[in-house]
């Protein structure tokens, strides 16, 4: 496959939205689904011992446990309905490999409203500290990354006062060790965001 770059911006102050690239083509959600899993679980009082770590540290095991307790089809259906998403449709493979467009990713982060989740999204630690976090530390962010089927998928979501943004990149994983591929995905996301934000 050739490399893919897409982005979508929501500007509430101007009352406009716009994007570029293949922003309506679904891509894997990866860890960008975790804020919704946390919000859905807290709303429905579904227990999870490391729900904060699922957001701040991108704990995959916590996401897998929560998705099983919530039911992946049920929780993704609630996400699509609650946030008015057009491209998130069944079948939902898992919390990481469900498909959503870049435009809908911007609307998803714009839709998160649970106060504790929003605070945790300003306190990202470890591997998730790239993308909007690098350019504007302290704003609401959630990144997602995965290598699957010979392709790297990296998603960078951010939200500030009056705006939300999503940038997604895809590129072949051939020729990259895992750490190098992840670093390249971060570089591409950061480069795209720099052009859009700065």
Image (cartoon, helix red, strand yellow):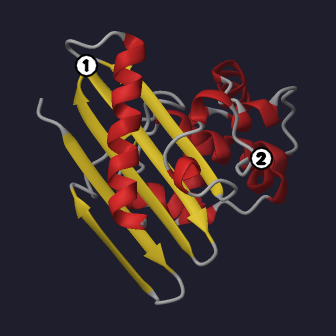
Q: Residues within 10 Å of mark 1 (few under 14, many from 20)?
A: many
Left or right: residue 106 versus residue 42 is left
Residue 100 appears in the rendering: no
Q: Quadrant of residue 178?
A: top left
The x, y position of residue 185, in whole percent, is 36, 33
Q: Is residue 142 above or below residue 62?
A: below
Residue 147 appears in the rendering: yes
Mark 2 to mark 1: distance in Å?
A: 31 Å
In the depicted view, which residue is nearer to us: 46 or 139? 139
Which residue corresponds to the image point at 39% horizontal and 57% vertical from the top-left? 194
The x, y position of residue 47, in whole percent, is 87, 32
Residue matched to label 2: 120
In the depicted view, which residue is nearer to us: 11 or 114? 11
Q: Residue furthest bottom?
A: 14
Residue matched to label 1: 173
Q: Quadrant of residue 128?
A: top right
Q: Quadrant of residue 63?
A: top right
Left or right: residue 140 versus residue 21 is right
The x, y position of residue 15, in whole percent, is 46, 89
The x, y position of residue 74, in whole percent, is 61, 42
């Amino acid at each position: 496959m050739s490399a893919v770059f897409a982005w979508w911006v929501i500007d509430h102050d101007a009352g406009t939205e716009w994007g570029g690239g293949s922003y309506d083509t679904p891509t894997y959600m990866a860890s960008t689904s975790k804020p919704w899993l946390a919000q859905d679980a807290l709303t429905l009082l579904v227990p999870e011992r490391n729900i904060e770590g699922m957001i701040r540290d991108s704990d995959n095991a916590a996401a897998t446990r929560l998705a099983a307790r919530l039911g992946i089809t049920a929780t993704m259906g609630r996400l699509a309905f609650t946030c008015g998403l057009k491209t998130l449709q069944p079948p939902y493979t898992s919390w990481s490999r469900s498909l959503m467009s870049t435009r809908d990713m911007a609307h998803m982060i714009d839709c998160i409203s649970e106060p504790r989740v929003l605070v945790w999204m300003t306190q990202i630690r470890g591997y998730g500290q790239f993308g909007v976090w690098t350019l504007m530390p302290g704003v609401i962010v959630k990144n997602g990354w995965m290598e699957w089927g010979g392709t790297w998928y990296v998603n960078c979501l951010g939200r500030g006062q009056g705006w939300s943004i999503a940038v997604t990149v895809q590129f072949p994983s051939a020729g990259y060790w895992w750490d190098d591929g992840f670093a390249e995905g971060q570089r591409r996301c950061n480069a795209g965001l720099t052009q859009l934000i700065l």
